[in-house]
Image (cartoon, rainbow, N blue to C red):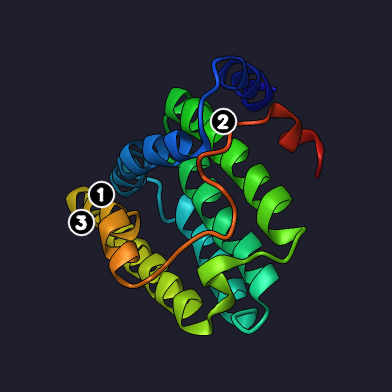
Amino acid sequence: KAAYMLGLVLQSRGVKLNEVVTAMRHLEPACAAACASRPDRETTILPRLRRNIDESRAHLDDADRYIGLARQFHIELVDGCGNETMSLIVGALEALWSAHVDTLARKTARLGSFADREVRLTTLKEHEKLYRAIAKGDAAAAERAAREHFSEADHQDQGWHHEFDLGGVVKASALRSG
C-alpha cells in the first residue's frame, strides 16, 4: 500500500526512475548499517540474506531468475534493518524499483548488463561482502559495502547498463502488473 501511494505521488510529480535509484543509492546503505547493528542479526536478518545468496548462487545461470533474487536481496536487507520507519520508506522505494525492473526488464527480456553471467557473479560477490560485514556486526563496513555495490561510477566504468529508460516517469501501475 505504501509503495503504491508513494508511486502515485511520484508519478503525479513526474519523478523519473533514475531519481528512485539515486534515492535508494543514498538510503539503502543506512539500512545495511542498521542490519549490522542489530544485536539479534544472527536470528533475524542473516538467515534471510544467507538463503537468498545461496538461492542466487544456485540460479546464477538463469539471468531472469537471478535478477528477481538479486532484487529480493535488497528487499530483505531493507525489511530486516530493524527500524520500522526505514523499512517502510526505503522498502516502498525498493518495491517501486523492483516492480519497474519486473515490468520493463524481466517481462520483456531486456536484461541489460544482467544478461552477462560475469555481471551476475560480480553482484553475487558484492552481496556476499555485504553479508560478511553484517555478520561481523561492522556497521561502517556494511554501509561502505552497500555504497560500493550501488556505485554508479564503478558500474558505468564496467559498462553496466539497463536496457530500459531510466528517464521514464515512475508508474504506480507497475506495482499492479505483477
| Alpha carbon distance from label 1 to label 2 | 20 Å
| Alpha carbon distance from label 3 to label 2 | 25 Å
Q: Check the image and report above or below for 125 versus 154.
A: below
Looking at numbered disc 3 in the image, what kind of residue is underneath it? Ala
Residue at image mark 2: 92
* Quadrant position of residue 155: bottom left
In-front residue for pair 122/112: 112
Q: Are marks 1 and 2 in contact (CB under 8 Å)?
A: no
Residue at image mark 1: 143
The location of residue 27, given as percent across then percent down, is 35, 36
Q: Are marks 3 and 2 in contact (CB under 8 Å)?
A: no
Residue at image mark 3: 141
Q: Residues within 10 Å of mark 2 (few under 14, many from 20)?
A: many
Q: Check the image and report above or below for 119 versus 177.
A: below
Q: Check the image and report above or below for 53 versus 169.
A: below
Q: Secondary structure at mark 2?
A: helix
| Alpha carbon distance from label 3 to label 1 | 5 Å
Left or right, 122 with respect to 146, comes to: right
